[in-house]
Structure formats: structure tokens, C-alpha cells
């Protein structure tokens, strides 16, 4: 792990900085990592936004074995290493990543305070 990763902080859900992962979402991410034999100590959860989607931007959620670069902001919470690139953080600062486990709406949910509009699909937003 890089020196930057060791100085990472915990994201504050009341702050407009970083990403906050709920305990329920973290448990699901950890379950998937275990299912796919990904080492928790060296696997990063990369959250971000990319252009496209119904509303202008699409959320990105992926695993990153390489960890943060100088263009990223690293955080640690609920036993996870989470990273977001600084450009995405501009559009997603303060976002809460949660997980719904209902029969009809199972999946990850992004609650983005910077979003000015969202799409019914739940994976795109405008800012």
C-alpha cells in the first residue's frame, strides 16, 4: 500500500467531502469480495462517476487491486478501503452508498446530495 493510503481518513456522512459507505453496503461488498476470493487488505472499492447515462452521469462501483493514485481520495470505513477520484468527488462529494436487500429493489443505492436530477434506473444523475 502507498503512503497516501496509510494516511486515509474516514469519510464523514454529514460532510460534502468523500463518500460514505453504510454498514449494510459494506457487509454486501465484503460478502462479494469473499465470494470472489479478493483480499480485503489489498483490494480497494472504487466509486466514481462517468459521463453518460439517462441523466448525464453514471455511477461507477468497482474493485481496484492497485489502490489510489495522486488523483484519488482514499477513505477507510467498516473494514473497507474506498477510493474516489478527485474529479468524480466534485460531482459526488457527500454521497452515501447504501444497499437495499428487498425482493423487488435489491442492489446498491447512491444518495447524492449534489445531484440535481436522477433517472428511474437509479444509476444515473445530473449535477
Image (tube, rainbow, N blue to C red):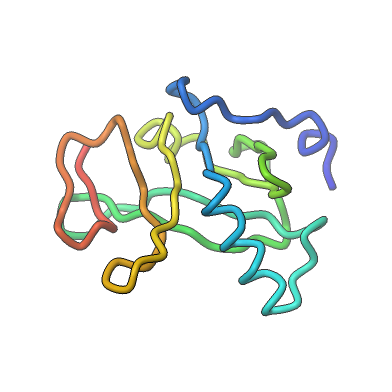
**Identity of the residue drawn at 61% across and 58% down:** 27
**Identity of the residue drawn at 39% across and 59% down:** 100
Please state the horizontal and vertical placement of residue 115, each as a whole percent of the image. Answer: 24, 36
Quarter holding residue 96:
top left
Would residue 78 appear left or right of 104 to someone viewing this image? right
Q: Residue furthest bottom?
A: 36
Report the quarter where the C terminus lies: top left
The number of numbered badges drawn on the structure is 0
Would residue 102 appear left or right of 33 to someone viewing this image? left
Q: Residue furthest front?
A: 103
Would residue 69 appear left or right of 7 to someone viewing this image? left
**Identity of the residue drawn at 32% across and 73% down:** 103
Viewer-proximal residue, 108 or 71? 108
Q: Is residue 37 above or below residue 45?
A: below
Q: Residue furthest top?
A: 15
Please state the horizontal and vertical placement of residue 12, each as a whole percent of the image. Answer: 55, 25
Please state the horizontal and vertical placement of residue 81, each as a whole percent of the image. Answer: 69, 47
Please state the horizontal and vertical placement of residue 43, each as a whole percent of the image. Answer: 73, 59
Q: Is residue 32 above or below residue 42?
A: below
Viewer-proximal residue, 87 or 89? 89
Would residue 35 appear left or right of 54 to someone viewing this image? right
**Identity of the residue drawn at 45% across and 46% down:** 97
Quarter holding residue 71:
top right
Amino acid at each position: 500500500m502507498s503512503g497516501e493510503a496509510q494516511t486515509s481518513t474516514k469519510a464523514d456522512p454529514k460532510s460534502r467531502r468523500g463518500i460514505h459507505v453504510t454498514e449494510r453496503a459494506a457487509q454486501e461488498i465484503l460478502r462479494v469480495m469473499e465470494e470472489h476470493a479478493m483480499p480485503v487488505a489489498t483490494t480497494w472499492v472504487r466509486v466514481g462517476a462517468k459521463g453518460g447515462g439517462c441523466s448525464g452521469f453514471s455511477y461507477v462501483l468497482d474493485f481496484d487491486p492497485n489502490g489510489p493514485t495522486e488523483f484519488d481520495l482514499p477513505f477507510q470505513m467498516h473494514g473497507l478501503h474506498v477510493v474516489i477520484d478527485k474529479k468524480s468527488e466534485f460531482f459526488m462529494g457527500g454521497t452515501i452508498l447504501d444497499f437495499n436487500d428487498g425482493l423487488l429493489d435489491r442492489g446498491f443505492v447512491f444518495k447524492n446530495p449534489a445531484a440535481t436530477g436522477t433517472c428511474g434506473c437509479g444509476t444515473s444523475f445530473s449535477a
